[in-house]
Image (tube, helix red, strand yellow):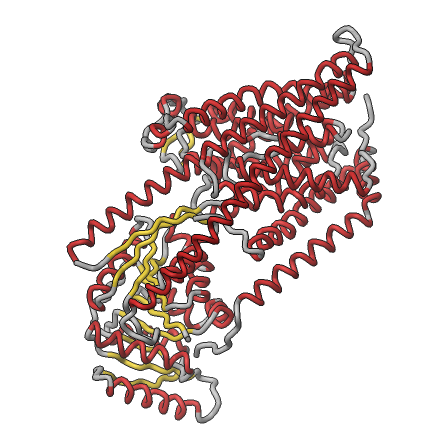
Amino acid sequence: METIQFIDLSVSSTIILFLVGFVGGMVSGFIGSGGAFVLTPAMMTMGVPAIVAVASNMAHKFPKALVGAYKRNKYGQVDIKLGVIMGIFAEIGVLIGKNVMVHIRATFGATGTNLYVSFVFVVVLAIVGSIVLRDAIKEKHGEGESDNQEPEELPPLARWVRGLVIPGTMIHFKSIDAKVSFLVLAPLGMATGMLAATIAVGGFIGVPAMMYFLGLPALMASATELVIAFVMGMGGSVLYALEGAVDIRLSMIILAGSLFGIQIGAIGTTYVKDYVVKFVMAAIMLLVLVSRFFYIPGYLSELGQIAPINQDTIRMLNGIGEGSLFFALIFGAIIILRALYSGIRDHHLAQSADKDKDLVAVAEHRQLSPVGRFERFLVASDGSDFSAAAVREAFGMAKKCAAQVHVMSLVATGIEYGGLGEPVLKKELAIAQDHLDSVKQQWNPLGVPCETHVVHGQIVEQEIIGMAEQQQADLIVMGRRGRRGLARMMLGHATANVIGKSNCNVLVVPRTAQIEGRHIVLATDGSRFADNAAVTAGHLANKIKAPVTVVTVVETDSEAGAVTKAEQTVKRIVKYLKNQNVSVEGRTLVGRPDAKIIEVVQEKNADLIMVGSHGLTGLERILVGSTTERILNGTSTAVFVVKGV
Amino acid sequence: MLANKNTARSPGALAYTLLLGIISSTLYLLLYLYSDIMTNIATMIRQGHKGYVVVPIGIALIFSFVHGAFTGRFWDLLGLKAKK
């Protein structure tokens, strides 16, 4: 048995590894697949033994999969149970695959594993590369469209698998709302693991297997694959590390470049057509295939499996192999950077056009000051009950305020997109647009002007805030509490971020809340931010014709004189609101602010609470275990957060 | 009752990205300085000291989180954003 050798790392080989990682990451982000089929051969070309290349590649990938899975889970795209079960079977596959590698190394030496890995690469890339190329050609000629129009249809294999009942082995999965025998999952998981252990890309089997055998939507399949990739990647890395095969220096240098590259690649995809992504993917796969193919005769000759080839010929063949790989990387990099360059140029042009649109939007405002302006509302909807409440109240209030409503739907995406992600994104965007069209139609009889917007992005709150800025919204209406979809994303951090970072007011509507104009409770602390809330409450009370109770709560342990100051504050605001012809009364209470405010809300049967806020740091701070959060969590009444200006 | 501190957003984001960048660079500097030890650890694992396996796995996790968080913000800060 040969000992495992780590290569010496000079400055130049470190730079090359970083660049290979960068380009590999870029390609990976662009075509949505692991990129390992570029990185593993590239490391091998640099003289890294196959087993070290695969092991080090795996060690740099599994933490990335963990981060990706965590992010995608926030968007409700991950079936954790399925991922973990498949991951465990994949782990068994990794164990088998690794033992095969170790056995080959023990029997035939490093050349044996190099040959084995190269052979598997050639076969897998030939199959996957041809399928992707066929799809790209079809799509370019417009034939791929028909596939996109039937998102609901279950693949025949999935129908068969779901119909297969083997008593005692059936497991229910939420993502497909069906039971599947684990005896079906076992070979799928194991095949994924074996491939991962051999070429460090298990997703080539895992993603299509979940789509076609289980009927998972591709978006969920690619997200769930990240859990599998983490479980088996972590296990595989430990197994390889136990053999001393993980060269952590290589892993981390590649990681350094790859994480920079993956973002650029992912951004690049948004500037090109789908079929371009697939053409690039197919071209790179086939070039890597050619590259590995030219090494095979040399390995065979070294192992004595074919007649000896003279060293010059082997050198020439290896040279062609290296050249093909180099060309594949450069080709990928040029296409992506070109797409990015032209995309950014177009984007700048579009931005100047947008500026003109902003001016028009501002000019359209009837009221000059943004304080208490109710002319443009933005509401995010995903079709759940929770966002339905937000949509209902947005239209209801818009009717009373003669405002226009912008309804947006968001498709959450990430850099961790699977190779089959782009067509799925298209489907998801089409589904989102259908949903918005139905919302528009449903509320059309109310006569409220309405525009719809479908967006996709990685960070939900950023997209909502961005849209609010773009549309010059005066109010963002958000749903609250949910287990999945947009409502889920809006819990906790996302809600806090939208409230904290947006420049306009935010109305948080719990599922059962209805704003009928019964009573408004205005919570104030006498700050200028609370004064903004008072002005806004005055405007709103007049529009929805609701009486107002102004409440200030002094905490029990406050300094002497705090009650008197609070009473003065309340009097000042009551006086102001009376001048605005609002029916108003004031209360100064002592106790825990949120509890007292909610008591008043219950006593008055109020249907709206208004509070002042001012900015990111402050609000994020108070949202962590303080008054506003407790009010938001402790009431089923809508809460209107007025932003400072 | 309500907090009253007002802070601008962008400088905070820039500082956070820089901080992540500094931590990430420091980690890589340490890896470079101790690269021989990393190679020795792999040798020791091969010689039967299997407990050392936590070192490469731990390094992979820590580097990925820190450097991942940094690069995620890096391009965004330079204005390179996905098209909608």
Vertical comparison of A601 with A54: above or below: below
Which residue is at 71% across, 43% downward? Answer: A252
Which quadrant: the C terminus of chain A? bottom left
Total labels: the figure holds 0
Instruction: Examine the image and state in which quarter residue A503 appears.
Output: bottom left
User: In this image, A191 relative to A413: left or right?
Assistant: right
Is residue A64 toward the left or the right of residue A78 in the image?
A: right
Q: Quadrant of residue A603?
A: bottom left
Could one spot residue B14 in this view of the protein?
Answer: yes
Taking A305 as reference, is A132 left or right? left
Most distant residue in the left direction: A445
Q: Who's the residue at 39% across and 75% down the image? A: A612
Q: Which residue is at the front of the view, A402 or A381?
A: A402
In the rendered image, residue B34, in percent from the top left (x then y), is placed at: 82, 48
Q: Quadrant of residue A504?
A: bottom left
Evaluate whether residue A507 shows in this view. no
Q: Residue at x 58, y 26 (%)?
A: A285
Please state the horizontal and vertical placement of residue A135, each as a whole percent of the image: 45, 25
Q: Nearer the viewer, residue A183 or A486?
A: A486
Please indicate whether residue A514 sits to the left or right of residue A640 in the image: left
Question: In the rendering, at what x and y percent does residue A370 appear?
Answer: 35, 73
